[in-house]
Image: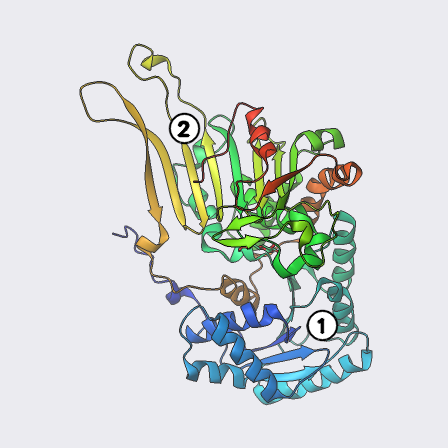
Amino acid sequence: MNHVSPNQDRSAIQRKPDPCSFVIFGVTGDLTHRLVIPSLYNLAATDLLPDKFCVVGVARKGTSNDALRDSLMKGLRQFATRPVDDAVAKRLLECVTSIEANPKDPASFDALREKLEKLEANRSTGGNRLFYLATPPDAFAPTSRELGRTGLLQQKSGAWRRLVIEKPFGTDLASAKALNDELLKIVDERQLYRIDHYLGKETVQNILVLRFANGMFEPIWNRNHIDHVQITVDEKLGVGHRGNFYDTTGALRDMVPNHLFQLLSLVAMEPPIRFDARSVRTEKADVLGAIQSQSEEEALRNSVRGQYLGGIVDGIEIPDYRKTVHVKPDSTTETYVALKLNIDNWRWAGVPFYLRTGKALGIKRTEVAIKFKQAPFAMFRCTPVDRLSQNYLVISVEPTEGITLQFNTKVPGPTVTIDGVEMKFRYKDYFKAEPSTGYETLIYDCMIGDNILFQRADSVEAGWRAVRPFLDAWKKAGARGLEFYKAGSEGPAGAEELLGSDGRSWRNLG
Ligand code: BG6
């Protein structure tokens, strides 16, 4: 494949972050082993870690440095996205120090501060610190409070202090607001990095580039030309061992106000005046704030909830959701959700956004499909053409990474016959990127102080505000309206009707 642009050497413009300490709370947990350390490894392997650097692993029950390093090395061997170079891994793990601290024991945070200061002096990190909370969500506020009390987050003498928080950010509007209020008493918004791993995906970041670095899409990116937008995140995996978390969360909370709304906001936002964190995040928050609020009656009409029954996915038997460990036997938690949303602004008035996501489905697929309005059929009336196929621009996020344009073309031959064809761009055909965890960019951005890919407080709250009517309406409805679907199927029948009643249908993913 030929590249037509001269801008191919990204590494040339990537700079090394400032010296810093990278403090991980929850260092013994799954997230650290599965994603954080493999991402730091990938950054080390591409020479994008600071020269003066240390990793401080904090756990409620500390271990020796050697035991922690061994455990992280095992995780790295299991989860690395590229072959592990022992020398690089050794260099990285030598930077790791284990420290015990527990927010229930304030003295342990005072001790943490002392140890950290000593370590920083030894490693000449200049006092720059990044605190990464890879902990269960109930530890976010208490840990931050202790970091605040001990002054560990206070920026002084030119040293920066940053706080990285994982999802879920609250469980509804009230809890998200409370967490924002609490954190913003301790740090400035610019010190806060609320991670949504969808923004680490190249294809998701590319939505902005597709829209705003090309002259041909933006003029037609509006209600005059677009009929509707479909956002799909279908997963094959069932809930597995996460029953405890999932049964109190459900598909909507788990996926919609965060991952699906990231996709929606990038597709629907207005052009930012600059490619900087302030402008981009303002436009994203504005469009989320423009999602039309719905009465509970409308919310019931414009949503479908489903729960999976046992079935086979990829030859593996998945039990009924209700038979999953730690799931209530009469649970009404949804494992599938489809929504119809409207955005109340000049660009999108009258253009529905249909969102769907579910677990234990027959296919794994994440995509955004922009459906354009049909061309007038008039000129084909006296030809053998009886229909035109649909014009879609499809942004494929997973498992295929690319962009597809579907359009009509004349079938070669003496008669006028028209068929739908596809023009396809696939990342793998053009770019030889090493497989990544998707977290490298996010961690690197935290270290260089670029918040563009992180959620701001107002966006998080706008997201929860937009889903509130559905959560409220479903709570009142209980089991009423909950549909069931077989694991391995396409999801509940109601999802088809949601579009069918508008004279539309989901794009065939088959
Ligand atoms: C997580 C959810 O945030 O995202 C999971 O908690 C979900 O339930 C996952 O499976 C999906 O991420 P991805 O990158 O596989 O689409």
Name the disc covering residue 390, or none.
2
> Residue tagged by mark 1?
154
Residue 218 position by quadrant: top left
Query: Disc 2 or 1, which lies upstream in sequence?
Result: 1
Q: Position of residue 268 (x, y in %)?
A: 54, 39
Q: Position of residue 87 (x, y in %)?
A: 42, 84
Ligand 1 lies in quarter:
bottom right
**Disc 1 CB within 8 Å of nearest ligand 1 atom:** no
Question: In the picture shown, does residue 15 fall above or below 419?
Answer: below
Q: Nearer the viewer, residue 181 or 335?
A: 335
Check the picture and name the quadrant holding the C terminus. Answer: top left
Residue 433 position by quadrant: bottom left
**Left or right: 136 in relation to 354:** right
Secondary structure category for the residue under label 2: loop
**Left or right: 108 in relation to 205:** right
Residue 57 position by quadrant: bottom right
